[in-house]
Amino acid sequence: MVNVLAGVWALLLGVVLIMLGNGMHFTLIGLRGGLEGFSAAELAVVTSGYFVGFLAGARYAPVMIRRVGHVRVFAALGSFMSAGLIAFTLLPEPAVWTVLRLLVGFCMSGIYVSAESWLNNASTNETRGKVLSAYMLCQTLGIIGAQGLLTLGDAATAALFVTASILVSVSFAPILLSITPAPAAEVTRPMSLRALFTGSPLGTVGIFLLGSIYATQSGMGAVYGTQIGLGADQIALFVAMLFAGALVLQSPIGWLSDQIDRRKVIAGAAALGGTACVGGWYLDGDYLPLLAAAFFAGGMTTPLYALFLAYTNDYLSVEDMPAASGGLVFTFGLGAISGPLAAGAAMETLGPNGFWIVLGGTFGAIAVYAVYRMSQRAAAPATETDSYLNVLPTSSVVAVEAAGSWAADQAEAERDANAAD
């Protein structure tokens, strides 16, 4: 493992720094927005702006990279993102923040495409699984660590936004000074939603609903904390628990999904996530149990993302997997745009607990639909399913395609080995 990481350590270090800056800004929006008097509905629009930009970046970043190269695109988007993070404190208006969030989302999407292209190029078929796992771990640790950094300053000042900007700016140094030239970003044209739904109704509907959950958790969690009167340190820990759950629960859920019908695991994970949300609503601000609710609600989100990718691939040919990956990422993004808007409206109407009601209802919809699909289609034989994909919702289609290809190769190797025995 040490030899594998030796060639990509600079990229992984840069990813950690980027995620520290981006993770800080996600929570800061909720904290500072509350101090500025923004409503939940206004902050929901601001949150959705990020995912609109992210989808646009996923579409146009490969085009820009083919035109001017990885290094220029990487540096340009990093500069724009760094400037955007500072601008939040200069122009505290909901409409302006929405535009800035769109800009940051666009930049982050392009940065992911560039970084993941480098990472994929630096890997071999034998090392790709380990490299991708290390990359996902660095992303998660960066987001969790960002919440710790928020406790070192005051959201009412510009200091934390400036810190996030500095982290993003510094992150490019180890990458640009040490990475070898990367190939052009080759992203397969996404499969149409109709074709995707025909191939995997559960994968398509489920990942759309999950996009709603993920964006609500990551974007509106701090808004919820502000509305129930938590302090900045408490909110930071609450958001960190949303991501810490995924770090702990990803592997056991992934292992289980390779042993039994994935739809049972999907339904069970969604039901557990929904139950945690009911607990969060019932607890009504009791802090320590609230952290436990966040741990399990957030802990189901990332595994479910990987489950939907793996489940969809189970019913596709290897040739269709790259296009399906693009379609799933796009569908997830559509859900991510709509989720905060629904949560913001619910919180305006029902109060802070509208946050849990929307999350719990969406988890419940996933569980019910998974059970329904079990009655409509026979399970794929365990020996013919692809390996679970350890991929985060923050990844671009480049990483999703790479993980899908690796999983298909692993599954094929396992089938060949079993046949030989």
Image (spheres, helix red, strand yellow):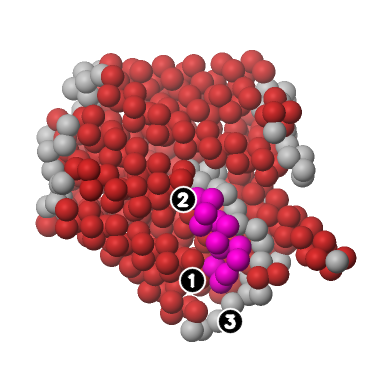
Q: Residue at x 58, y 28 (%)?
A: 12
Q: Residue at x 57, y 69 (%)?
A: 260
Residue 179 belongs to magenta span: no
Q: Can the viewer see residue 182?
A: no
Nearer to me, 19 or 133: 133
The answer to whether 224 appears left or right of 99 in the picture is left
**What kind of element bears circle 2?**
helix
Residue marked by disc 3: 378
- Image coordinates of residue 121 in percent, x first then y, are 72, 36
Q: Amino acid at mark 2?
A: Leu
Nearer to me, 414 or 20: 414
Residue 252 belongs to magenta span: yes
Q: Quadrant of residue 408?
A: bottom right
Which residues fall within the magenta stretch? Answer: 250-262
Q: Residue at x 47, y 18 (%)?
A: 169
The answer to whether 113 appears left or right of 181 in the picture is left
Residue marked by disc 2: 249
Classify 187 as above or below 131.
Answer: below
Q: Dot 1, how many residues are within 10 Å of its Cα: few (below 14), some (14-19), or many (20+)? A: some
Nearer to me, 163 or 278: 278
Q: Amino acid at mark 1?
A: Lys
3 and 2 marks in contact (CB < 8 Å): no
Residue marked by disc 1: 264
Q: How many marks?
A: 3
Q: Can the viewer see residue 267?
A: yes
Q: How far is the residue under mark 1 from the one under mark 2?
A: 16 Å
In this view, the mark in front (3 or 2): 2
Q: Amino acid at mark 3?
A: Ala
